[in-house]
Image (spheres, grey):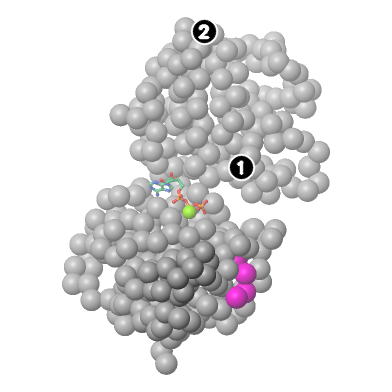
Amino acid sequence: MSCGLPVLEVENLKEIYESVKKRVVGREREIRNILAALVAGRHILLEGPPGTSKSTLLQAIAEEIGVPFIMVEGNADLTASKLLGYFDPAQAVAEGYKPEHFVEGPLLEAMRKGGILYIDEFNRIPPDALNVLMRAIEEGEMVVPRVGPVRSRNGFRLVSAQNPYDDVGTTKVSMGIYDRLCKLRMNYQSREEEKLIVRLRTGCKDERLAELAVNIVRRTRSHPEIRQGASVRGAIHFVEIFQQLARLEGENAEDSEVYLSLVLDAAYMALSGKLWLVETSQKTPEQVIRQIVHESLGMVSGEEEIRVRPFRMTEASREVREELRRFFRGSSGRGDPPRG
Ligand SMILES: Nc1ncnc2c1ncn2[C@@H]1O[C@H](COP(=O)(O)OP(=O)(O)OP(=O)(O)O)[C@@H](O)[C@H]1O
Ligand SMILES: [Mg+2]
């Protein structure tokens, strides 16, 4: 019995590495380490907050190696039979357990095709599904009742991903399972890389808008009332929504108050569902976002101001009015088209 699988026969490992690097912003070290582990025959656990490029990297790596990529969302409903497959109940009753009535699950598919099985939220899947996965990677073969043995082709790898801070509704994954996986910790990328990601994914040509988006989400990660802030995904959503809001407002958006309200609305839409406040916080996500937006725009905002609705420019913030106007003028005003 082996703990892993044979080394993958890839002659052009360096070329694969170079091609994957061209498809994502940064992450050289992560790409290198993931590639090394996969080719060495190992299975991987990626640990990091949401939006830290885990799926993007794995998809690019699978495509460049040339193996199928099969993605499964881990949750409490992912039973062993969903992973393996099952006989269609109606057809099985009518015609018996014929092979053609077997609905293949993602694990068997990945084993049969020699693909990468990517399971998100690994710590949310139930123990019986975890056991089946462990058997598959340990033994490289599963015996499915009425189907027979299925051997995994070389190339089959399990890549699991989980958020280390997610402790609601998660299963305690045993040390025995972790012992069989090689772990890579993923964290947020640098400010400059995040700006590039936002511009790449939204087609935004306005560097200052991308910068504002990244500044806002980065502030959510260090705010004392936020347990888990937003990822670059939040910045991407912010820019996409802001661009369309500015388009809808047209000329009006040149007014600094309207501009500010659009920034706030885009930030509420993009971020309010993504923030996880500390339990002791008395604020709503919207209040925290408003404060962060003000700070990111260089406006000083105290508690009082945060409660004012709708937002009005105060004397104290009047000096930034011109700054905002200049900012907006420079940001191509009516909103860039979302792509290109
Ligand atoms: N380094 C990067 N290069 C290019 N795009 C990136 C990068 N990092 C993140 N993105 C983009 O950000 C978004 C989130 O990335 P992705 O879905 O890969 O994160 P994830 O770690 O899988 O998140 P989750 O844990 O929520 O599934 C995607 O739109 C992705 O294209
Ligand atoms: Mg993902």
Label 1 sits on what residue type? Lys
Let me know if residue 300 appears in the view: yes
Most distant residue in the bottom direction: 1
Secondary structure type for disc 2: helix
Q: Which of marks 1 and 2 is nearer the N terminus?
A: 2
- As measured in the structure, the alpha-carbon distance from the residue carrying label 1 to the one carrying label 2 is 29 Å
Estimate the x, y position of residue 34 in percent, counting from the top left: 38, 66
Estimate the x, y position of residue 300 in percent, counting from the top left: 67, 24
Which numbered disc covers residue 73?
A: none
Let me know if residue 47 appears in the view: no
**Looking at the picture, does residue 77 appear above or below residue 264?**
below
The residue labelled by disc 2 is 252
Nearer to the camera, 312 or 121: 121
The residue labelled by disc 1 is 274
The part of the chain drawn in magenta is 123-128
- With 107 as the anchor, is 132 left or right in this view? right
Give yes or no for residue 175 being in the magenta stretch.
Answer: no
Label 2 sits on what residue type? Asn
Which image quadrant: the C terminus? top left
Secondary structure type for disc 1: loop
Q: Quadrant of residue 285?
A: top right
Please give the name of the residue rendered at 19% of the width and 68% of the height, measured from the top-left corner.
12
The rendered magenta stretch, by its main secondary structure, is classed as helix
